[in-house]
Amino acid sequence: MTATLDRTVLPPSESLDALVSMLAQLGVEPTTTLSGPNGEHLVLPPEVFEVLRDVVAAMAGGQAVTIAPVHQRLTTQEAADLLGVSRPTVVKLLESGEIPFEQPGRHRRVRLADVLAYRERASVDRRAALDRMVEIADAADMYQRTATPKRTR
């Protein structure tokens, strides 16, 4: 059987809540098995089980899920779409060295794994910056000042 790469699947119309609950109760166990239609049982590796659990949770939340291999090469536009930024912004990230890229001819190509790693780093950096802003606002007693309503005449 050949796996279909780069495939988006819409969530089903029926509720997946019972399946989400069952998968959450199982945790990640090395002995999780899948029963086939002919009665055969296959042991799922923990990584496959985690992906299955995440896919079901996303679909239960009404989200579509895209399946793509991590070694996939992306165009700058595909990377921009994945990051939720413009293509020129991605080009700037590539040229500044934030995301590695290859340019075998005229067009730049980036590895999906590198784009995902950048997205994670950017997310961690944003969280740290927000935490620092909260610390500064707390130290300056900004929350108390905004919580106290001003009286007007």
Image: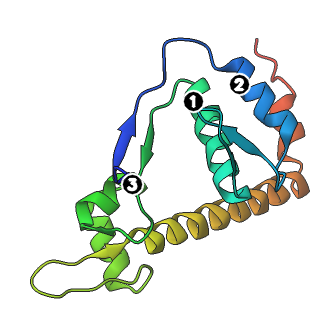
Q: Position of residue 28 (x, y in %)?
A: 82, 50
Callout 2 amino acid: Leu
CA distance separating discs 2 and 1: 18 Å
Q: Which mark is residue 19?
A: 2
Q: Report the side of 72 relative to 30 (left or right).
A: left
Earlier along the polypeptide chain: callout 3 or callout 2? 2
In front: mark 3 or mark 1?
1
Do callouts 3 and 2 mark residues in contact (Cβ within 8 Å)? no
The local crowd at label 1, few if under 14, some if 14 to 19, many if 20 or more residues have their Cα within 10 Å, is few
Q: What residue is drawn where x is 65% and y is 33%?
A: 39
Q: In what element is the residue under mark 1?
A: loop
The local crowd at label 3, few if under 14, some if 14 to 19, many if 20 or more residues have their Cα within 10 Å, is some
Callout 1 amino acid: Pro
Q: What residue is drawn where x is 62% and y is 43%?
A: 52
CA distance separating discs 3 and 2: 28 Å
Q: Nearer the viewer, residue 2 or 37?
A: 37
Q: Nearer the viewer, residue 105 or 22?
A: 22
Q: Report the side of 101 relative to 113 (left or right).
A: left
Q: Is residue 61 above or below residue 55?
A: above
Earlier along the polypeptide chain: callout 2 or callout 1? 2
Report the number of discs: 3
CA distance separating discs 3 and 1: 36 Å
Q: In what element is the residue under mark 2?
A: helix
Earlier along the polypeptide chain: callout 3 or callout 1? 1
Disc 1 designates what residue?
37
Residue 93, by quadrant, is bottom left
Q: What residue is drawn where x is 20% and y is 86%?
A: 103
Q: What residue is drawn where x is 50% and y is 30%?
A: 63
Do callouts 3 and 1 mark residues in contact (Cβ within 8 Å)? no
Disc 3 designates what residue?
82
Q: Is residue 149 above or below residue 7?
A: above
Q: Report the side of 22 relative to 64 (left or right).
A: right
